[in-house]
Each structure stands twice: as structure tokens, then as C-alpha cells.
Amino acid sequence: MARVAIIGGGVAGVSSALILSQLDIDITLFEAKDSLVGGPPFCHLHAGGNLYPDITDKERVQLLKESIEFAQYYPFCVDKRPTVIAYPKRFSKDVQDFIPTLKMLQLEYKKLIESSSANNILGDWEDYYSLYSRQELEELSKNEPKEQPSSTGEWLIPFAKYTNLDILQFPVIVVQEYGLNMFKLSAGAELTLNSIDTIDLNLNTEVKYIKKESGKYTINYLKNNKIDSQEFDFLINAAGFKSGYIDDMLGLHKDRMVEFKAAYITNWECGIKFPEIIFHGERGSKEGMAQFTPYPSNYFQLHGMSKDITLYKNGLAKATPKSAQPKLEDSFLEKIEYGWSQSELELRTKQAITHMGFFIPKFSQEAQRAFKPLYGAQQIPGCNISLRGAEVEFVKNYARCEIVKVSSATTMAKEIAKELKKLKLTNKDFTQNLTHLNNLKESELKSLSEAIAKTRGYPKELADVVNPMQL
Ligand SMILES: Cc1cc2nc3c(=O)[nH]c(=O)nc-3n(C[C@H](O)[C@H](O)[C@H](O)COP(=O)(O)OP(=O)(O)OC[C@H]3O[C@@H](n4cnc5c(N)ncnc54)[C@H](O)[C@@H]3O)c2cc1C
């Protein structure tokens, strides 16, 4: 049996382990932390990339297809509520110019459903997006928010009631891009990988150095305060923003960037189920995009794509000719390793609340800082900061995972499966057999995801979803 090592237990590493486990190979996963999927956060399934004004149509279609596939594998972490996309008057782009893109994505989604009914993940293709005029929103605002919204119009009531419509362009867009819950994925991955005999899952285990000789990789790792080593036929680098260190260990060069970002957790005792809301803006400016992400129990997560909120001055580092690992300033690495100072946490959360208050005034009057932010560094392959659709690159018996959005993980893992077959390290093909994931028990998932949230210093409610997906 061929032996495959995976370095990193983020969404790229766990998806690789899960999909390759169908191939009669022996898999060893090394993860430095004490749980899986504990890297940079994620909350949004980018099914069409509608949050990004600047990506190519090709990337949008890629994100749409990959998101559908991702939701088929991991439905238990999908939060099925729509996303409102609003163009402020102050934004340089005109909402009308985006409508052909929505039509294009709608037709792509239709084609996907026609090719397989299993792709019908985002509802009917006709409803992939909807447009609302000011008059329609004013009508909706006369209704009381629903306890359990069931139509797009019902989801829009809170938006129509609480947003300052005077500062927006019309129409306002609603797309069927859903939420994702990282704590649920972390728990589901741990329960699943532990149940598969051919996977050796090593948490609290850090890969320290690698030697390549006669086509084999000897991996030296630190576990239980002891250095040990094992030999492998194929190596998967899924080390996220630390992937460059692995390239450096192997003497390989690769252009990449690493970006530190943060999202802020607030509490607004409004008792209302909101959709996700995006207010577009110029990335990096004071008027950068504002993202309002609902969690259960009145928790709301905020992104603000300005340097005072989610982005940072010097928060983007690039690889150099000497090292494939971009070097973030120590202050960022210290945050990742040891946490935030209270004063910075308070200041940035306050700025995030004020930023959102421009659009939802009542929110900024009533919301409070709740917990520490969700934050981290992510890698972006190459030199294009707008890139959202990368996957995996191969160098002989080495796969370098290069996902920018989590939805690329399962498609990427399938590419690795094909490469292993090409290299004759397996003669099996992967199938769409999801038995292990389907066997997950809701009660186990709930208790482990809540425990993981608590261990990481967040309330257990953040491990829950507003509107679970029924498949
Ligand atoms: C603020 C923020 C918000 C985001 N929001 C979204 C979103 O809404 N939707 C979305 O799709 N994406 C989002 N992203 C991007 C997304 O978080 C990342 O693309 C994704 O998590 C990357 O997954 P990964 O598995 O490649 O890397 P990671 O999750 O970073 O996993 C890498 C793992 O490798 C381990 N590791 C590294 N080196 C070693 C070693 N030597 N030995 C052992 N283990 C090692 C690390 O501990 C880590 O667990 C966001 C990113 C940020 C920063």
C-alpha cells in the first residue's frame, strides 16, 4: 500500500484525507494544533463569488461549481440563508453593470442542475438571484420579521426595516449564497477521520523537517515532546499560510502571498433572524466593504474591508527569491500564536460596529463587543491579491494545496486522487461515496462542535447554524 503524508489539518488537509481514503492507500495526517480546521476562519459559501466585484467570470463559475460540491460533502456545516448584496451610492461601481453577471451565473447553475439533480443545492435555478426595488423594500419593511423566514421576501424584511435605504443604489440583489460553520466542520472532520481505519490522524504533531531521498520523503515530526520520523511515497503540503516553510524544507520556490485578516464578534439583542448582508465598498479604503454575518442567539460577525477593521497596514506579505514563505510582521504572528491585547480588540470591534452603523444605524446604537475576533492568515498563490479560485499544483510526488476559498477543497482533493492514479500509487478511482460523512450523528456533532468552540474561547452558540440545510 502506498503511503501518503498530509501536512496540515485545515479544510484542505481533511478533505484530502477523506477523499483519498477511498483509494486503498495508507494516509498519515500531521496537524500541529489540538483540533482540525482551526486555521483562519470562514463563514460564507462563495457559490458564484458575488462578494467580489473584481474576479473573472471563469473564477465565479469555478466557485459556483466547487461550492455545490463542497455542500454535497459537508451539508452539516451549511447555514441555508440567502445573502443580500447592496451597492451604496458612494461605491464607484454601478449595480446595473453586475446584473449580466448574475444572469450568467443563473444559467450556469441551471446547466449544473440539468447535468445532475444532486446539484440542486441552492434551490430552483430561477431563484438563484432576485432583485428588489426601493418601493418593494419599503413595502416589505411594513411587515414584522418572521421567526422562521421561508421565502426570499421574508428573509428580506429585517434588511428592509433596519437598513438606511437612502444611501443605497437600486435594485438590491439577493443571491443564494449560504453560510458555513467552521466549528461544525472541525467536529465533523474529526469524527469522520477517526472512524476510517486507513487514516492515522496525529493532532498536536508538528512537522519539523523533511528529507527527500530516492523518491521517498522522510518526515521528522515532534509529538509528545519527542522527535520521530516516518517514510512516505507521496507528500501533500496543506499547511495553509505556513506552506512556504514546507517548500523551503524541500528546496522548492513558489511565489505566494500571505494575508492577515480579522472579523469581529458582536452581540445585538434584537431577537431577529437576519440574512447575511454585504454592503460593497473600495477594498482597503475607509469605505471598504461591510459584511454582516448572523449567528444564532443574537451574535453577529462583522468584516470591514478597511485597514482599521479587517485589513491591516503591512498585513500582506510576499515570498522572496530567498524563501517561499512570506514573512508576516511579528505582531501578526504573535496574535495568531498568543491572542490579542484587550485594547486593540476593543478598538477594532468598536470601529467595526461604527462602520456597520453607517448602513444599519440601530445596530451601532445597540450592539456590543461580544468575544475575541475570528482571525488568521491565509495564503494566496501567485501575485494577484484578487485571486479566489486556485486549487493544487504538483511537483513529482508532491502536491502543494493552494486553496483561497474553502469551497475549493473537495475539488482540489479529487485532483490529488487523479494524480495518485496517474503515478500508479493506487489503481482505484474515488467515488462519490460519502458513507463516513453520512454516518455522522447529530448529537455527537453538536457536542463536539460546541466543545471545540469553547476550547477556542468562543460561545457555544457560534457552533450552531441559523437555518440548517436539509438534503
Ligand atoms: C478573516 C478571514 C475570513 C475568511 N472567510 C472566508 C469565508 O467566508 N469563506 C471562505 O471560503 N474562505 C474564507 N477565508 C479563507 C479560508 O479561511 C482559508 O482559505 C482556508 O481556511 C484555508 O484552509 P487550508 O486548509 O488551506 O489552511 P489552514 O486552515 O490554515 O490549515 C493549515 C493547517 O496546517 C497546520 N500546519 C502548518 N504547518 C504545520 C506543520 N509544520 N506541522 C503540522 N501542521 C502544520 C496548521 O496548524 C493549520 O491547522 C477567510 C480567511 C480569513 C483570514
Image (spheres, helix red, strand yellow):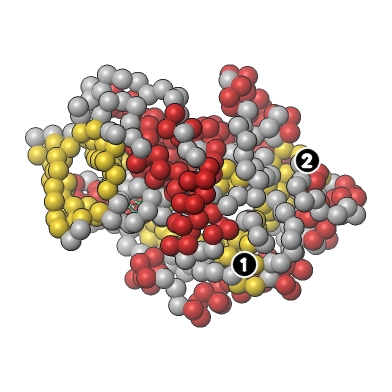
Task: Pinpoint residue 421: horizontal percent, then vertical percent.
Answer: 28, 23
Q: Nearer the viewer, residue 8 or 299?
A: 299
Counting labels gives: 2
State the residue at coordinates (58%, 19%): 115
Residue 320, relative to residue 55: is it above or below? below
State the residue at coordinates (56%, 57%): 462
Tell me if residue 422 can be seen: no
Q: Nearer the viewer, residue 295 or 385?
A: 295
Question: Could you say which disc has been placed on residue 147 in the image?
Answer: none
Left or right: residue 5 versus residue 351 is: left
Q: Quadrant of residue 364?
A: bottom right
Left or right: residue 311 versus residue 159 is: left
Residue type, label 2: Ser
Give the crowd class for mark 1: few <14, some 14-19, many >=20 residues within 10 Å: many
Query: Which tag, 2 or 1, sits closer to the chain's start?
Result: 2
- Real-space Cα distance between discs 2 and 1? 27 Å
The residue under label 2 is: 151
Q: Nearer the viewer, residue 390 or 241?
A: 241
Task: Please tell me whether mark 2 sits on a helix, a strand or a loop.
Answer: loop
Quadrant where the image shows the N terminus: top left
Say whether mark 1 is within 8 Å of ligand 1: no
Give the crowd class for mark 2: few <14, some 14-19, many >=20 residues within 10 Å: few
Task: Pinpoint residue 234: horizontal percent, then vertical percent.
Answer: 22, 35
Residue type, label 1: Thr
Say whether mark 2 is within 8 Å of ligand 1: no
Task: Pinpoint residue 249: horizontal percent, then vertical percent.
Answer: 19, 51
State the residue at coordinates (24%, 36%): 4
Tell me if residue 343 can be seen: yes
Task: Please tell me whether mark 1 sits on a helix, a strand or a loop.
Answer: strand
Question: Could you say which disc has been placed on residue 266 in the image?
Answer: 1
Task: Pinpoint residue 375: horizontal percent, then vertical percent.
Answer: 47, 62
Left or right: residue 179 versus residue 198 is: right
